[in-house]
Image: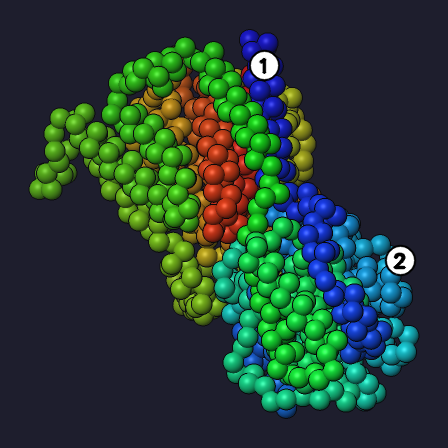
Amino acid sequence: MAFTKLVNFVYIVIHFVAIVLFLYGYFSLSDNQNLDNLNQYDNMIAVKPIVSHCELYKKEPMFKKLVFVLIDALRADFISVQSMPFVSELLNNNTAIRFTSTAATPTVTMPRLKALLAGIRPNFLDIIRNLNAGSFNEDNFISKAKEAGRRIIFYGDDTWMKMFSKETFIKFNLTYSFFATDYTEVDTNVTDNMRPELNQLEQWDFMILHYLGLDHIGHSFGAKSHLLPQKLHEMDYVIESIYEKVSAQNEPYLILVTGDHGMTDDGNHGGSSSPEINTGLLFIHTGLLSKMTWANNVLQSVQQVDITATISLLFGLSIPIKSHGKLITPLMKHWSVPLDQTTCYLFENSMQMKNLMKFSDATVNILSKAVEGHSEYISSVNKTSTVLKSVEKNYEEFLQNAQKEVIINQEYTSSIGLFIQVIAILMCFFSAIKILENEYKEVNSVIFNGNLNEPLQVFMLFAIGARIVLLGSTSFVEMEPFFWSFLSSTIVILSALNFFLVQRTVPSLFNFMSLPFDYAVGIIGHISAIILIRIVSSWQTVASRFSKQQCILISGLFWIYLYRCDTNFLTTYRLPFFNLIPPLSSLFKARLIYLHILLLLMENFFKRRNIDFDCNLIDGLIPKRTRRNNELTPSILRTFTVCWILLICLLSKLVNIPLIAISIGLEKIIYSITKWSLKNDFSHLIYFVSTYLTFGYTFYYSQGNSNDISTIDVASGYIGLDDYMPLFTSILIVSNTYSQLIFWLLMMFVRITEVKSNLLAFRVTKAITGTFSFLITSQFLTVGYFMIVALILRNHLFIWTVVSPKLLYETFQSFLIFMVAVMVTICTQLGR
C-alpha cells in the first residue's frame, strides 16, 4: 500500500513537471529570435547615402526633454471635456494631439510596460510574473536613453525598479502598485516628488511619472465609482501643472500621456475586451513647434508598440532592436514636420524592422522600391515633393505589412518540443488511469467495459467526456458557464425522474398531504433545487443590477431597522456598555475574522491531542483533557469548511454574499437526493463526486468568474492588509476566485466521511483515496486534451484571448484540486 502511494505521487509530480515544460515552451515565443542571421537586405544599393543624409536628424532631435506621464488603467473614453477640461482645451487649440492606443493581451502592467518601452509583444506568462516582476533584459527605450547619456528620473510604480537597476535613474521614489485599496497616497507621493523637479529642469532630461490611483479605484470600486471622475480631475491638474512649468521655457519639450491598459466596467483588466485594450494617448508639445489643424473628434488608432519607435526617433535614439512598432506618421503631419525629415525617420524605422524576421517577397519588394526611390531623390538635382511622397508611402506600406507579419508569425515555436511534451502528458494520464485501476479493480469494468447499473452514472460519465471534447471549440470555452448551469439543472431533473420511478407512483397535487413524509420531502427538495439553480444561473445579471442600487438598498434597510427598533418591533442589540468599546477600523475587523479562523483550526489541533479547547468568559482559553472523539475526520473537515465559509464571506463582493447562503442550502438538498449513491460500488461514487464537482463549477461561474483573466477580483487580496505581501495576497485572491468550487469539494469529502459503516462497506480512507484518484485523473485528462487543442490552434485568431487564458486556468485548477485532495488526506490521517 505504501509503495503504491509513493508510485502515485511520483506520477503526479512527473505530470506537473510536464505541464510546466509545456507552458514554458508554448508561451516562450520571443526568446528564440535570431536577429543576426536575417540580414537579407544588406545587398540593397544606395543605403549608405541615405544613412549619411539622415544622420543630421539624429544629431539634432526634435525635442530636448520628455515628461512621460503613465496613468495606470487610463481607458480611452476616460479622456473627455467633463473629466479632463484642461486636456480638452489643449486638444481644441491643437497644442495636444490625441490617439487611441491599442494594447495586446495580457492587459496587465508589466507586460504592457515591456510593450511601451521595448516595442515587443510580451510573453503571455508575464501575467503571472506581473505579481513579482523581474529584471528587464530586452533592449528598450530606457536603456538606449541611458547609453546616450540622458539623465532620467522616475517616480511611481515599484514595478519599474524591479525591471531596471537603481543606476538607471539619477533620482527615484517608489509607490507600491499591488496595494489596490490605496488610491490617494500612491498618487500624492508622485506629485509631491514631481513638483520640485519642475523648478530644476536643467538637472534632468527624461522624467517618468507612473500614477496608480485610477487603477486602484477600478479594482476596489469599479469604473462607475464616483471616485473615478475625481481622480481624472486630479490627473488633469497634474498635466496642467507640468505644462505650465515646461511651456514657460519656450523650448521644444514633449509631454507624453498614456495608459498601460484600460479596465472593464467592473474595474478589472487582463483580458481582450475593447475597454481593456483601448487606452488614451496624448502628445503635448511646447516651444516653437508649428502645427496644423487636427480633427480631434476623429480618433485614430495606433498600436501600443508604436509609441516606442516614435519617441525613440523624436529624441534621436536608436529604436530597440526587437521592436515591431512603427512611426506614428499622423503626428508628423500635425506638427508640420518637413517631409524629408519624416522620410528619414521612416527609413531608420524600416532598417530596424527589416531584421526581425524573413518577410514575404511582396513586403521585401516594397522596401526595395522605397529605398531605391529614396536614394534617387537624395542624389537628384531637382528634388520634387511628389517623388518624396511616393517614397514615404512605400515606407509606410512596408512598415504596415511588416508589423502584421511579425504579430502573426509563430515560426519560433518549437512544434517538435511541444509534441514531445504532449506525449509526456499523455503518458502521465495513462499512468493515472493505471493507478485508479490499482485502487479499484471495478474501474476497469466501469470505464472500459461499460458495466454501469444506473442510467444516472452513464449520463454523468457521458457529460464529463462531452465537456472535455467540447473544449476543442473556442466558442464553447467562452460559453462554458452555461454548460455547467445546464448540466446541474439536468442532474436534478433526472434525479427527480429516477426518484419517481423508484417510488413507482406519480404525485397528485390534490392528495399531496397524504403522501409519506420522505416522499414529500423528496418532491419539495427537487423543486427547490431547480428554483435555486435558476436563481444561481442568472445571479450575475441580478447582481449587476443590484450593485447600482446597493447603496440605496442598504441605506433603506438600515433605516427600516432603526424604525422597527423605535416602534418596538425589534430590539436593538447595542447595549450601553458597547459605548465603552472604541470604534474599530475595517482593517482591524478583518484581522479579527482571520483570528477566529485561526482559533477554529487550533481547536482541531487540540482535539487531535485529546484536549478540549474550552472558551468561556470566566476561565478564558483553558485547554482541558477530555475523552478522545472516535470520529474526528468529519469533525476536522467540517471545522475546516466552517473556517472556509468565514473566509469567503469576508473576501466576497457584497452582491455575492447571498450566493454563499444559497450554496450552503442547495448543498444540503443535493446531498439528500444523491446520498443513495454512496454504496460499496465505485461507479456510484463516481456519480456522487461528479455531481458535486458539477455544482462546484456552476457556483464558480455564477459568482462572476469566467475563462477571461479580467474577471479575477484583485481587490480581495488586500482585505485586512496594510502593506503588499505577495504570498498572502496571492492566497487571498485564489481563495476568493475559487471559493465556491473549494466549498463544494470540501463538502463532498465531508459527506463521504460522515457516512456510517453500514451504508459504506469499504473504509473511509478507501473512499477518500478513490475520490482523490478520480478527481486527479479526470482533471489531468482535461488538461492533456486541452494542451493538444492549444497546440493545434496555435495559429488561431483567438489564441491569446481565449485559448491561452483557458490553458492557464485548467492547469492551475489541476494544482488546486490536488492541493484540496492532499489537505483532505492529511485531515483523514489526523482523524484516524
Can you tell which quarter of the image residue 209 is in?
A: bottom right
Q: Which residue is mark 2?
A: 167
**SS at badge 2:** helix
Asked whether, in this view, residue 290 is left or right of residue 810, the answer is right
As drawn, which residue projects farthest toward the front? 381
Observer-nearest residue: 358 or 695? 358
Looking at marks 1 and 2 on the same chain, the residue that comes earlier in the sequence is marked by 1
Amino acid type, mark 1: Val
Q: Which mark is residue 66?
A: none
Instruction: Give the color scheme: rainbow, by chain, secondary structure or one colour.
Output: rainbow
- Residue 709 visible somewhere in the drawing: no
Asked whether, in this view, residue 213 is left or right of residue 685, the answer is right
Question: Which quadrant: the C terminus?
Answer: top right
Amino acid type, mark 2: Glu
Rendering coords of residue 508 (x, y %): 10, 38
Observer-nearest residue: 524 or 30? 30
* Number of marks in picture: 2
Q: Which residue is mark 1?
A: 7
**SS at badge 1:** helix
Observer-nearest residue: 293 or 122? 293
Q: Give me the C-alpha separation between circle 1 and circle 2.
A: 51 Å
Residue at 39%, 43% in the rendered image: 473
Rendering coords of residue 353 (x, y %): 67, 59
Asked whether, in this view, residue 144 is left or right of residue 422, the answer is right
Q: On screen, 27 above or below 217?
A: above
Rendering coords of residue 550 (x, y %): 45, 65
Residue at 45%, 44% in the rendered image: 700
Residue at 12%, 33% in the rendered image: 506
Observer-nearest residue: 508 or 728? 728
